[in-house]
Amino acid sequence: MFALGFDIGGSSIKAVAAENKKIIASKIEVLPKSFQGFLKVAKEMKNALEKELKKKAEGAGFSFPGPIDKKREKIIACPNIPYLANKSILKILKKELQISSIKIEHDIHCFLLAEREFGVSKKYQNVFYLAIGTGLGGAFSIDGKIVRGFHGSAGEFGQMIFNLERKETLEDICSGKYIVKKLGIDVSTAITEAEKGNGKVQKVFSELGYNLGVGVAGVINILDPEVVFISGGISTARKFFDLEMRRAIQTFVVSKKAKKTKIIFSKLGRFGGAMGAGLMAVES
């Protein structure tokens, strides 16, 4: 089956073409500022991939940064792309793209699917997966099965409250939002500056790492996974926050054995979500 996978992120749209569970082409575009713009770009990317490969897509998968309803037809909430929320997105996409078989899923679940197929998480049955980019998402599997929850929105790690008085969530202090707030620059620029030896920027990454470690420690205390996977754009700056993250984990995880929980950085790269979405479509 020839299918397309789209990963809709806070700043870009990534797309891949998949056949027999292999990625054969990819594209990336800047995320438009309107819903109509989003549909237009998604359609253009779909047409471009079909033209390049000289074949029509039999299915498509879409990875979105927000919880999906239980029927997998609507996006319940989408804090980083508000225009996507509360629309019959599945129905609209089928009409606009003229593809009858389309699936939509929370982006982090797509990352986890891709990691299980193309990465190393297939070795593990109990996994917690984090994606750190513009926002902060989480997903987990128990006994090899991805847990979506009763309402379909399990894993909203980034929306956990960190500071009630300031109404801060983990996403506010562990994602690209924190970089922008503290430094006034985007993640890509911040990573470049850190690589150049900018001490101020490196300090902010260290702070982010410690905050992240506190959150991960909470997850380990609750779920006790075999492994925690970390992916997303900010994960490429791991050398600037890894030490502080692990220090916080060691400080706040209760069980001595759980303090040894494996922390693995994904090697899937920037197209991980799209790969998972494509895989989801191929398996439909």
Image (cartoon, rainbow, N blue to C red):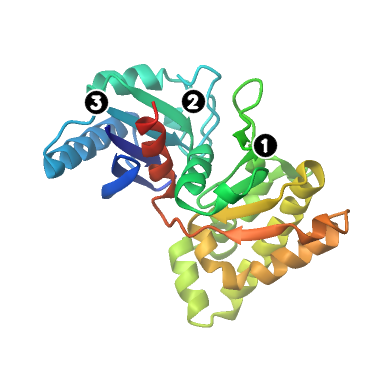
Q: Which mark is residue 75?
A: 2
Residue 23, percent from left and from top? 31, 47
Labels 2 and 1 touching (C-beta < 8 A) = no
How far apart are the two marked residues, 2 and 1, measured between alpha carbons?
27 Å
Labels 1 and 3 touching (C-beta < 8 A) = no
Residue 175, percent from left and from top? 58, 54
* Neighbour tally class for label 1: few under 14, some 14-19, many 20 plus, Cα within 10 Å: few
**Tag 1's secondary structure?**
loop
* Neighbour tally class for label 2: few under 14, some 14-19, many 20 plus, Cα within 10 Å: many
Q: Residue 97 carries which label?
A: 3
**Amino acid type indicated by mark 2:** Ile
Identify the image quadrant of residue 31: top left
Q: Residue at x 65, y 68 (%)?
A: 242
- Residue 175 in view here: no
| Front label number (2 vs 1) | 1
The answer to which of 189 and 68 lies nearer the viewer is: 68
**Amino acid type indicated by mark 3:** Leu
**Tag 2's secondary structure?**
loop
Q: Nearer the N terminus, badge 1 or badge 3? A: 3
Q: Nearer the N terminus, badge 2 or badge 1? A: 2
Residue 70, percent from left and from top? 56, 19
* Neighbour tally class for label 3: few under 14, some 14-19, many 20 plus, Cα within 10 Å: some
Q: Which residue is drawn at 39% across and 26% down?
A: 284
Is 221 placed left or right of 266 in the picture? right
- Residue 113 in view here: yes
User: If the image is split into quadrants, where does the N terminus sit?
Assistant: top left
